[in-house]
Amino acid sequence: MNRNQWLRVIEVVGGIVLLQGAIGILNEFTGLPGGWGLIGHIGFLDGHEVYGSIALIVFAFAVFAAVEAQRKN
């Protein structure tokens, strides 16, 4: 794989992380049943799912910024 393909893979992973963070926030504030978000299944985050979801969203934006910085090089 060349560099652009790796950057694309990292960007897709960042998108998945962003989606998981958004699902966690949506699940906490709307109370949707089903538990289809990853953050609700992490044991040490019990009671702190909102903070974990926000951290995932911030991490995703940091990944996007890093990919963009690498593309400009």
Image (tube, rainbow, N blue to C red):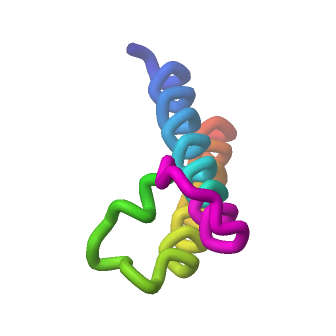
Measured as percent of width and height from the top left, residue 6 is found at: 45, 27
Which residue is at the far top? 1
Q: Which corner quadrant holds the C terminus? A: top right
25 or 11: which is nearer to us? Answer: 25
Measured as percent of width and height from the top left, residue 3 is found at: 47, 24
Instruction: Count up the numbered dots.
Output: 0
Q: Image check: 38 left or right of 60?
A: left
Q: Quadrant of residue 45?
A: bottom left
- Does residue 22 appear in this view? yes
19 or 58: which is nearer to us? Answer: 19
The residue under the point 44% across, 85% down is 47
23 up-or-down from 6: above or below: below
In magenta segment, residue 12: no
Measured as percent of width and height from the top left, residue 16 is found at: 54, 42
In this picture, which residue range is highlighted in magenta?
24-36
Which residue is at the far front? 33
Which residue is at the far left? 43
- Does residue 62 appear in this view? no
4 up-or-down from 47: above or below: above
The residue under the point 54% across, 80% down is 51
The residue under the point 56% across, 27% down is 8
Q: Quadrant of residue 25?
A: bottom right
Which residue is at the far bottom? 47
Q: Image check: 25 left or right of 3?
A: right
Measured as percent of width and height from the top left, residue 61 is found at: 65, 58
Q: Quadrant of residue 54?
A: bottom right
The residue under the point 28% across, 78% down is 44
Q: Image check: 64 left or right of 17?
A: right
Q: Which corner quadrant holds the N terminus? A: top left
